[in-house]
Image (cartoon, helix red, strand yellow):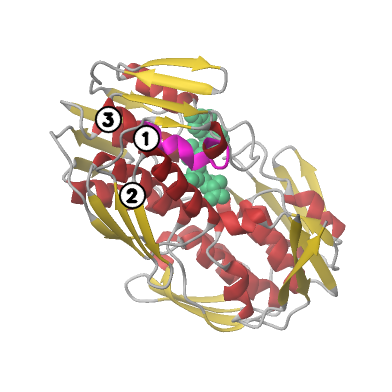
Amino acid sequence: MTHPELVIESSPGLQGVATLSGAKNAVLVIMASLILTGGKNTLYNVPFSHDVLQMIALLESLGAHIKMSRETKTLFIDTSSILSCAVSADIMKKMRASILVMGPLLARFNKAAIALPGGCRLGDRPIDMHLHAFAQMGAEIALEGHYLYAQAKKLHARKFILAYPSVGATENIMMAATLVDGKTTIVNAAIEPEVLDLIAVLKKMGADISLFPAGVIEIVGVKELHPVSHTIIMDRLEAGTLLLAAAVTGGQIALPEGPGHSLEVFLEKLVEMGHIVDVGFDGIGIYFKATQSPRAVSFKTMPYPGFPTDLQAPMMVAQCLADGTSTITETVFENRMLHVQELQKMGAHIQLNGLVAQVKGVDMLFGATLIAPDIRASAALLIAGLAAQGTSTLTGIHHLLRGYNDLSGSLRNLGARITMKTELI
Ligand code: EPZ
């Protein structure tokens, strides 16, 4: 069995222009939403990360016919041939986004049989809000072993007041409601850019969806939805990760496609650190120059437009090498500090108290043998290796491959010293 690992050398300040891939957290839910159309759909700017390949396998297991072109980053997804509503455990356990087929299956077929989803170990990551909402819409849901069986004679429209603006629950309720008679309302809905990209796709399909201020979404059911073509938005999280790689190595990079308009709180924190950040006039394009004496900043992760939880780990690396002490509070996931112990191996001074990390900046991190515990932590450890003195090795890189199209390649193009080593074990 091969055991791939990355060898990461201390790298000079990253320099150059980087392109971005389509957003993972948009493309996965949009692929699931195509179940609603029962026709031939085309997606452009698709990132061919492992999670996308997994979602392709899931849709094919339902009967969809899919063709992909890596060179043109295009997916052709024909869902007219979907006959099954059952997703096996070995597919479901590989990623959290698998749960997002439940809403479309219930809407189109009034039933779904799926195994409990898997994904990053960020806590127990319940799906209670999803299931409770489907039950409130009239679905009968039974858990038998690892399988959830849901079916409904007819789903009903209703008003949901979410206790927490869950991204997945907002997406699943919205997709389920598109074909349900009447008006479904979601109060305290998630409004992440990836959710808005899903809304754009559903409206292209013919769904009647309105987004109001302060996170209220209204969906009025229609009789049917038709196939679409859509270009996936750029990945703001990949953009943030590349910027932080430039920050920790003292570099200067340009992201001409960078979605500056959907990273404002994060970019403001980089400016607070003393880095130079310019954004294009329409919010597109991010131009970055690192300061050589970064100041530590504190932050708390929040639902959009707050500081994104998916940039917490990479941003922590920048605080490890900044002047001063940073207080980092994770409020979204109850177990998203697994990267702390790995950074401590590199000489980082981090005191962790539950979900609050006190990071005292040091002059230098040192190369170490690192184990990636989840997608965003793997990116954080990768960029930490670039800034560290000496050489690091990073295993568990399947997380990196799950979440990014080719982050290592993008970094190498900017001067990062990263090589892949495959050990036979
Ligand atoms: C989506 O996860 C993203 N994943 C996550 O990205 C992202 O971090 C997260 O939204 C927040 O922005 C995809 O889009 C595929 P949530 P999701 O429902 O939908 C709790 C990455 O690295 N909760 O907003 O799972 C949950 O446990 C991944 O790209 C319930 O308690 O996020 C968490 O603590 C990681 N019950 C909080 O809400 C539920 O039924 C936020 O979860 C649902 C969620």
SS under mark 1: helix
Cα distance between the residues tagged 2 and 1: 23 Å
Task: Report which quarter residue 256 is drawn in.
Answer: bottom left
Total marks shown come to 3
Vertical placement of 179 versus 332: above or below? above
Quadrant assignment for the C terminus: bottom right
Give the residue at mark 1. 172
Quadrant assignment for the N terminus: bottom right
* Residue type of the residue flagged with mark 2: His
Cα distance between the residues tagged 1 and 3: 10 Å
Q: Is 50 placed left or right of 389 in the picture?
A: left
Toward the viewer: 83 or 37?
83
SS under mark 3: helix
| Residue contact at pointers 3 and 2, CB within 8 angstroms | no
Instruction: For ligand 1, tell me if the residue under mark 2 lies within 8 Å.
Output: no
Give the residue at mark 2. 65
Percent across and percent down for residue 318 are 69, 65
* Residue type of the residue flagged with mark 3: Ala
Give the residue at mark 3. 107
Toward the viewer: 247 or 43?
43
